[in-house]
Image (cartoon, rainbow, N blue to C red):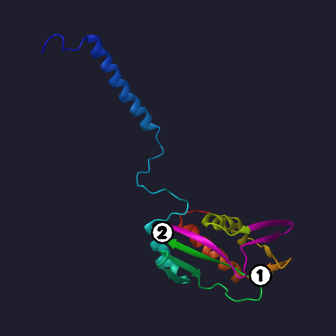
Amino acid sequence: MSKSDSLSPEMIKILKIFGLGSILFVLTLSFFNEKRANNSGKEESILSITDAERLFFKNVRGIYYDIEARDDAKMTIYRYGKRIEESESPLINLSILINRIKDEAYIYVEPSWDASHFKLRITQGNKVDTLAYESGDKLAHFGFVKKIYPFLNENAYFEVWKDNKWVSILENEKEIDALRIPISDFYRLINNPE
């Protein structure tokens, strides 16, 4: 090795400082890194489910539901078995859809009358709330369900705007349970502690 190929003491000192500085920088950043990189290639969703949640729902809660397999859409539709299907007054039922390709679950609002949108008035004592339902994508249905769920556990009176007048809906415990139980099961399915 010739004298011109060796590193000068100043260069060795600079390399040591740079090396130690780099190591300290990486270590410092690693202590403050709470968010992990998602390298799975899949985007996380608020509606995603795990295999354990799917198996629990299918084997434990699924027995309370009427099941419709939709192989064309790669989905399974669950409708609460004790729901009221026929009534003179309007009804709101729900269906839980499990997308086995995307590992997601969706909840859909199914009014008994032909309505792509409606208003629901909720009266609790002196307080009156009005919720608007607008048929749309999976998040629109989920948004409506999130708004109505807290009222189902309270002593509330429900009315829907239909045929230019307010009509009583969800009049008995069975109709309310037909909404409350599937919503509760859905929250457990998507691991949401609502």
Give the magenta range. Answer: 104-132
What residue is rendered at 45% in x and 68% in y? 101
* Placement of the C terminus among the 4 image quadrants: bottom right
Report if residue 116 lies within the magenta region: yes
Give the residue number, with chain letter if any, for mark 1.
171
**Lateral position of residue 43 relative to residue 183, left or right:** left
Closest to the observer, 180 or 121: 121
**Horizontal and vertical percent for residue 6?**
19, 14
* Placement of the N terminus among the 4 image quadrants: top left
**Horizontal and vertical percent for residue 163?**
83, 79
Pointer 2 with pointer 1, Cβ within 8 A:
no
**What amino acid type should be assigned to the residue bearing mark 1?**
Glu
**Horizontal and vertical percent for residue 158?**
79, 75
Residue 139 lies in quadrant: bottom right
**Element on which disc 1 rests:** loop
In this picture, is 67 found above or below 188? below
**Horizontal and vertical percent for residue 144?**
69, 67
What residue is rendered at 55% in x and 68% in y? 188
Report if residue 179 lies within the magenta region: no
What residue is rendered at 47% in x and 38% in y? 32
Give the residue number, with chain letter if any, for mark 2.
53
**What amino acid type should be assigned to the residue bearing mark 2?**
Glu
In this picture, is 75 found above or below 150? below
Closest to the observer, 184 or 15: 15
Residue 13 lies in quadrant: top left
Disc number placed over residue 32 in the picture, else none: none
Closest to the observer, 50 or 113: 113
Q: Answer with mark 2 or mark 1, whichever residue precedes in sequence.
A: 2
**Magenta region's main secondary structure?**
strand
How many marks on residues?
2
